[in-house]
Amino acid sequence: MTQNEPGEDPMSVFAIFNEIGIVNQLATAVLAASLPEGVHPSHFSIINHLVRLGDGKTPIRIAGAMQVTKNTMTHSLRVLESRGFIEVRANPDDGRGKLVFLTARGQEFREQAIMAVGRQIDQLITPDLRERLVRIKPDLVAIRSHLDNNRL
Amino acid sequence: MTQNEPGEDPMSVFAIFNEIGIVNQLATAVLAASLPEGVHPSHFSIINHLVRLGDGKTPIRIAGAMQVTKNTMTHSLRVLESRGFIEVRANPDDGRGKLVFLTARGQEFREQAIMAVGRQIDQLITPDLRERLVRIKPDLVAIRSHLDNNRL
DNA sequence: CTTGATTAGTATGATATCGAACTATATTAG
DNA sequence: CTAATATAGTTCGATATCATACTAATCAAG
């Protein structure tokens, strides 16, 4: 396949991803401040993933989606389980594997956390910013989807 | 100041930041794979910051910009100094403080790293994706700038 | 000046993450 | 069926990051 004029301007695309990185850094800080003590944004992200794509997934699939190693997932799932946000059961179809399920408490937690961070965001952004965010959403989805389907 | 109809739709803005987060996650993974062993994306980010905004900054200012604590910065600067990418000197104007300077080696490193990650990105994105990225850049800059100037 | 409060940086102990090695189960070749 | 290989998850040792506490230097009040 032909290669979009390689090296055309390596800096410019890099700079855009850099902007995305900074936005994410700032937004994550807002999220972190909205979460209760001991709950890391990465933990929240796991719960969020289970709600969006459905639970009953194996730890290794979740790890792949989150781009973390399986031992990191082992650790994170323990934290979530100790808080009663998820349940980890043996996989009936695979003696090696496990399956992760959200609990009612985990779902409540997610909703409350999103409300909390939503309030912070409301205080932070203007109508203009909100409009810009909505405007770029389709492109972001396309970019996310493509990168997600073409990982290295 | 009036507040953009609070709670209008907390989920929708949250979902967009979520997309940004995933894009960043995937892009960071590409960057991490392009960096030499032992150099963390956060280390690269510090060098990048020093190039973009100029060096001779205090560790604490860099920590603020990167949204990490000052002890994290102490640690990261030691890694970068041990590799010869930066120099940390006493601040002549403040007996407590230090100043961080890029070395020639640090600048070379940044350029090579950007080239390396640029090649990976070239292989990963299509002309359509590149177009989308360029298209959303102005909005991203506006969003980043606003969030940066209105941190909690 | 001197004292109290603030600030820059470091030290210490904790959690999050990673890579490599290990265990147990599944799958495949023959 | 058995042996070799692959996969799911855990364990272990290392780095990155954080919160708290500490040291040293600056600044502000008087």
Image (tube, coloured by chain):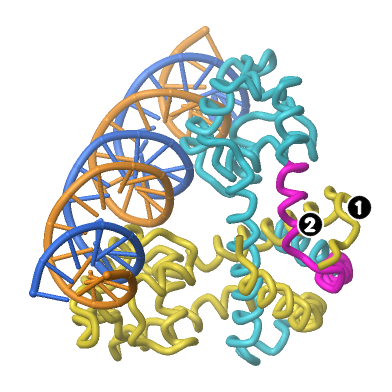
Chain colours: A cyan, B yellow, C blue, D orange
Tell me if mark 2 has few (under 14), some (14-19) or many (20+) residues whose alpha carbon lies within 10 angstroms of its own: many
Query: Where's residue B95, x and y in %?
Result: 18, 78
Give me the disc on residue B82: none
**What's the residue at 41%, 74% (across, down)?**
B61
Amino acid beneath label 1: Glu
Query: Where's residue B111, x and y in %?
Result: 44, 86
Q: Secondary structure at mark 2?
A: helix
Query: Where's residue C19, x and y in %?
Result: 37, 49
Looking at the picture, tell me which residue is in the foreground, A58 or A95: A58
**What's the residue at 61%, 60% (across, down)?**
B152
**What's the residue at 30%, 91% (across, down)?**
B104
Looking at the picture, tell me which residue is in the foreground, B58 or A94: B58
Give me the disc on residue A122: 2
Q: Is residue A12 above or below residue A102?
A: below
Amino acid beneath label 2: Asp
Rendered-image quadrant of the C terminus of chain A: bottom right
Side of B56 relative to A123 (left or right): left
Tell me whether the residue at label 2 lies in contact with that at label 1, contact meaning CB atoms closer than 8 angstroms.
Answer: yes
Task: Give the magenta range.
Answer: A114-138
The chain that hosts pointer 2 is A
Give me the disc on residue B8: 1
Q: Is residue C23 above or below residue A15?
A: above
